[in-house]
Amino acid sequence: MRSLLALLSILGLYGSYQAGAEESALSKLKASADLRFRHEFTSKKGSGDTHGNHKERVRVSTALSGDVNERIFAKIQLGTADSASPTSNNSTFTSNSSKKGIYLDLAYVDWKFCDCDESQLKLTLGKQYNPYRLTWGSQILYDSDYTPEGATIYYDRDFFIHAGAYSIEDRTASSTTNPPDSSLMAGVAGYKGNLGAAKYMAAIGYHDFTNLKGQSALSSSFNGNSNSSSLYIHEYKIGDFQLVISHPIGDWSLEAFANGVQNFGTNKNNLGLSTGLIAKQKADLPWAGGYMYQVVGKDATLGAISDSDYANGNVGALGHMFSLSKGIAANTNVAIRWYHSKVDNDGAPYWTNKGLFDIEFKL
């Protein structure tokens, strides 16, 4: 609890408390947590076959959130991970039952500019949920676990705009070199509406990852992106469109989605598309299922932050994903996902399979 107060003090928010308001604000804090166990299977055929690798993994996250005052909301979330990867919160059961690492996953404030509808205009500061991944069936540009670090302005009505600036890599100067820092400047604009019983969302965006050409790999891996002498050879200035259409069918909702990308930092292998269907049941213990087809050029997106499960985390691939889930008790869910993908691998292609078998508990 003292750690939360210390963070709010650093942000300059705690000083706005009146002497008698501290106890009231703290009493409104909400705690949440989730626990997921996963069996993971991967195999590869071609260019170094593997007969299959099995892993047992766990994901744990816990969060505190609450209103600082009438206009400011804060949230802090910690989670497990094998390393400080930006695209995975899984920790593997291995190394003789060694202790597992805990990392900062979220630490942000939402600051409303007025006492009007909270969804209308606000500023988000810190390590936050991704404001640009609006097509939840697709992770072609950003992995679902990616939580950018910076500032975002939101205007959310039927017409909406999200725009912001974020830190990507803070490079240290030496006596002989002064490498530029890398950042992300991004924005998305779109519209949400109805067509009879159907709902739709359409948006276009631009994502400029600055100063990557000539630099070493982010997170120590190129994940299929073009490189020479272990340095990026292209910039990543990516435009995208997102489209979602959903329609109720009895107790079910059927959603079709498409997410296309183009990297304007190069004119080769710079296009990608993710499209599919998601069906969700409205019930106390619902079923859900989905299908996705994805094709992505090796420089269409930045491999270090795109989907870490599709094609084993590589761009320059095409393939399919099938999913099925079922609620089996209150706050308890089981799920299966299966990926079948072909990876270009610089002219030495191979096929890869990945199966994810989960049981998740929400507290």
Image: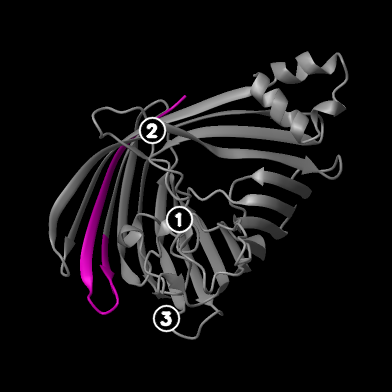
Residues marked 2 and 1 touching at CB (< 8 Å): no
- In this view of the protein, which residue sits in the foreground, 147 or 348? 348
Which part of the image, by quadrant, shows the N terminus?
top right
Q: Which residue is mark 2?
A: 285
The answer to if 327 sits in the magenta stretch is no
Looking at the image, is mark 1 or mark 3 nearer the viewer?
1
Segment colored magenta: 340-363
**Badge 3 is on which residue?**
269
Numbered disc 1: secondary structure: helix
Q: Nearer the viewer, residue 190 or 287?
A: 190
Residue 156 seen in the figure: no
Q: Which residue is found at the position 77% from the left and 29% from the top?
A: 9
Provide the secondary structure element on which disc 2 rests: loop
- Write the residue at 40% across / 52% down: 279
Question: What numbered label is drawn on residue 173?
Answer: none
**Of discs 3 and 2, which sits in the foreground?**
3
